Image: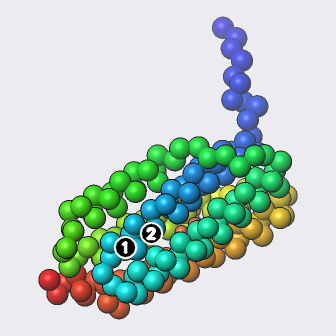
Amino acid sequence: MATTNKASTKGLTELFHGTLKDIYFAEKKILATLPKMAKAVQSPDLKAAFEKHRGETKEHVARLEEVFEVIGKKPQGKTCAAIVGMTEEGAEIMEEYKGAAALDAGLLAAAQAVEHYEISRYGTLLTWASELGLDEAVSLLKLTLGEEKATDEALTQLAESTVNMAAEAA
Ligand SMILES: [Fe+2]
Ligand SMILES: [Fe+2]
């Protein structure tokens, strides 16, 4: 029986557009969640790190809107189940460790899971943009990827220098 597979006509351009919608949704979700996380933690350094990254995340959203423009599409999000799940896990930690010394370490770890997700997505988008010859998108995605990596490293430093010790001291 002959069947036409509609999906067979879909290529890298569609994958790129779909993943762009995924990370656009994710960045907006992160933008809404970071103030809650900054408010919840005790460590002034961790609070400052979350607030700093909130400012960067605003830029990430704006850059993604520019990338949509590069491919001639309207900025549009698509529900990203991964980020919804990670946000729920962060909320669980806030609930379960409310007032506990380990709250900061738990939320720092939750934030790093998000950073790793973003690094993965931006790494992929960057490779695809380059293969599709979207030079302007490559530059924009590179800037954001660099900030996600720097945030991840800053969080590791904070965990190792103070936040984990505070949790252990409890
Ligand atoms: Fe981001
Ligand atoms: Fe991030």
> Label 1, on which residue?
39
To which quarter of the image does residue 164 belong?
Answer: bottom left
Q: Is residue 116 visible?
A: no
Residue at 83% over, 64% down: 136
Q: Quick check: which quadrant has ligand 2?
A: bottom right
Q: Nearer the viewer, residue 123 or 48?
A: 48
Residue at 45% over, 83% down: 48
Is disc 1's CB within 8 Å of ligand 2? no
Discs 1, 2 touching: Cβ within 8 Å: yes
Q: Position of residue 55 (x, y in %)?
A: 58, 74
Q: Is residue 68 left or right of residue 163?
A: right
Q: Position of residue 133 (x, y in %)?
A: 85, 58
Give, as a three-letter code, the residue at label 2: Pro
Q: Give the CA distance from mark 1 to mark 2.
A: 6 Å
Give, as a three-letter code, the residue at label 1: Lys
> In this rendering, is residue 157 above or below 3?
below
